[in-house]
Image (cartoon, rainbow, N blue to C red):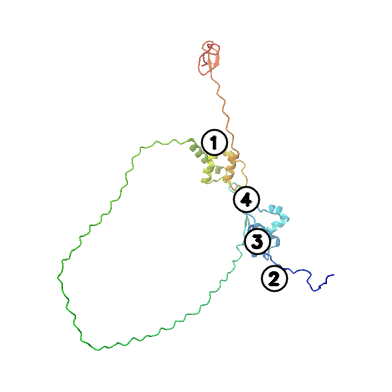
Amino acid sequence: MAEQHPSAPSRAASSVATRTHRTGVVHVNSPHRHSYTVVGNHLAQHRELSLGAIGLAVHIQSLRPGTRISIRCLAQRFPEGEQRVAGYMRELEEAGYLERSVERLPSGRLLPRTVSYNRPHSLPEPVRHEPAPPLREPVRHEPAPVLEPPAPVVEPSAPVAEPPAPVVEPSAPVVEPPAAEPEREPEPVRPAPEPVRPAAEPLPVPEAAGRLGEAAELLVGLRRTDPRLLLSEREVTRLAPAVVAWLERDAEPGAVRRTLTACLPPELHHPAGLLAHRLTSLLPPPLPAAPPAPLPFQTCDACDRAFRATEPGRCGTCRPAGTPAP
């Protein structure tokens, strides 16, 4: 049998615990690259909020804007009941992390609205201590040395020689250069007059342009039926050709308006997308060709019988063989 060593440790010690603290929590942090939410310690370590309220606040802050967070929806998402969820939301409202209100739409419908704050307004801003600037040693200005002026040098006196008289040469005639002619400024180039064009006759407006104007008026007037169907000029220009396709298939403007505004969803976030879907998926088929109108009745000139023809004449019985029908 192998020798036993009772002094050897039973298992290897954790390298994480030995490098940090012997007791308490040990953090093993990994960097998040995507899908994460930043939560302040003022919420994670709140002294007055319950553990469920803190968890609910973190869950609400991680949701996308526009997600419904009513008490019923949260109770279906988590195992806690509606009473506990309502209590947690009241705690967050009192702490300033949540604000709930009811907004009345122009149609009279009440719409609940919830605002989540990742930092309450009542929370004071942290005081930032800026580091003091480093002390600089004062610059000592030493006095400049005083320089004494040099003593004047006295030279022995000498006879001063008189300067020679200047030699005067005969003056030559001064020839002045010819005066330069003043430069003339170039005359401005005048544009040639444009030829007079004869007044052109107004071009006929194609039928498609008139249909586009009618389609644009129909789309702009949808907000009179429902204020939520407010479209921009760019959206009206994009959807007008689809409305023209309806009008070209003999659909009345009133029928198009009723189709676009009927059974709208309670929450309408993108009216242009809904209208584009309905204009494409509910486009009616073209009407079948109308049957030809029957020929009018005529009276036979020979037997006074009634027969159908485009012009008066004789019926098929009284008409000679080989004569075309009128």
Amino acid at pointer 4: Leu
Q: Looking at this view, is 50 or 33 the one in front?
A: 33
Residue at image coords 72%, 57%: 84
Disc 2, SS: helix
Disc 1, SS: helix
Q: Distance between the residues labelled 4 and 3?
A: 22 Å
Disc 4, SS: strand
* Residue contact between numbered discs 1 and 4, judged by CB atoms under 8 Å: no
Q: Looking at this view, is 324 or 226 the one in front?
A: 324
Between disc 2 and disc 3, whose residue precedes? 2
Q: Which is in the foreground here, disc 3 or disc 1?
A: 1
Q: Distance between the residues labelled 2 and 1?
A: 78 Å
Q: Where residue 101 sits in the image (x, y, percent)?
A: 62, 54
Decide: few, some or many residues near mark 2? Use Cα within 10 Å; few <14, some 14-19, many ≥20: few
Question: Which numbered dot is residue 247?
Answer: 1
Amino acid at pointer 2: Arg
Between disc 2 and disc 4, whose residue precedes? 2
Q: Which is in the foreground here, disc 2 or disc 1?
A: 2
Question: Which numbered dot is residue 19?
Answer: 2
Position above or below: 14 against 198: below
Q: In this view, does 76 lie to the left or right of 293?
A: right
Amino acid at pointer 1: Leu
Q: Is residue 48 left or right of residue 259?
A: right
Mark 3 — residue? 94
Decide: few, some or many residues near mark 4? Use Cα within 10 Å; few <14, some 14-19, many ≥20: few
Mark 4 — residue? 111
- Inspect this view and state whether residue 59 appears: yes
Position above or below: 1 against 59: below
